[in-house]
């Protein structure tokens, strides 16, 4: 059997506050949308313009995430694409494709208060707020401020 990959990595801004609901079994499900923007050159005018794509994201089993994922915040999302079908109120079959997140990290950006723009968000736990564990339960290791790889600019061959 041939190998396949279903992997999505997005860095963008939240379009609205995350909403968390619970399944009948009590499992939390958080949903939010991310805007990703790219710059393209208009072939007619030669002017640069922004094009924005919206992606719907679903995060399972992490109910505390909604308080941190608020409109305008910049986030890193890693997960997989999933398409599901359902019947609308008129009985028509509809399809929805969304990103099922394995990992969500707050990066900073808009909505941080008076600390200045951009950069990594400092609160509440670390430089990058990890709100969902990596697949397999991996955790970030150690304090990266104290990390010294022992490599200087003289060691780089170019």
Image: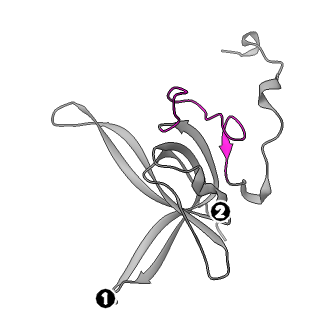
Please identify the residue farthest to the top as the structure is shown: 154
Residue 24, quarter of the rendered image: bottom right
Q: Nearer the viewer, residue 153 or 70?
A: 70
Residue 111: give x, y in percent of width and height.
48, 39
Q: Nearer the viewer, residue 12 or 126?
A: 126
SS for tag 1?
A: loop
Residue 7 visible in rendering: no
Residue 66, quarter of the rendered image: bottom right
**Residue 74 located left or right of residue 93:** right
Quote the CA–CA distance across marks 1 and 2: 32 Å
Name the residue: 45% across, 79% down. 85
Please identify the residue farthest to the front as the structure is shown: 114
The quarter of the rendered structure image containing the N terminus is: bottom right
Looking at the magenta stretch, what is its main secondary structure?
loop
Q: Which residue is mark 1?
A: 90
Residue 41 highlighted magenta (yes or no): no
Q: Is residue 36 above or below residue 148?
A: below
Residue 126 highlighted magenta (yes or no): yes
Q: Nearer the viewer, residue 98 or 115?
A: 115
**Residue 61 located left or right of residue 40:** right
Name the residue: 79% across, 52% down. 138
Q: Is residue 104 above or below residue 21?
A: above
Residue 58: give x, y in percent of width and height.
55, 64
Q: Which residue is mark 2?
A: 63
* Span of residues in magenta: 111-131
Residue 49: give x, y in percent of width and height.
27, 36
Mark 1, other Cα within 10 Å: few <14 / some 14–19 / many ≥20? few
């Amino acid at each position: 059997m041939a190998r396949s990959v279903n992997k999505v990595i997005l860095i963008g801004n939240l379009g609205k506050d995350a909403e968390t609901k619970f399944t009948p079994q009590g499992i939390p499900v958080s949903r939010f949308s991310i805007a990703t923007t790219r710059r393209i050159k208009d072939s007619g005018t030669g002017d640069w313009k922004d094009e924005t794509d919206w992606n719907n994201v679903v995060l399972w089993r992490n109910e505390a995430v909604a308080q941190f994922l608020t409109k305008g915040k910049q986030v890193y999302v890693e997960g997989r694409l999933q398409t599901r079908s359902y019947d609308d109120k008129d009985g028509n079959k509809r399809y929805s494709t969304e990103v099922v997140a394995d990992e969500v990290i707050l990066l900073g950006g808009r909505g941080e208060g008076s600390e200045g723009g951009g950069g990594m968000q400092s609160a509440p736990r670390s430089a990058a707020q990890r709100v969902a564990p990596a697949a397999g339960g991996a955790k970030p290791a150690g304090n990266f401020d104290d990390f010294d790889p022992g490599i200087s600019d003289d060691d780089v061959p170019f």
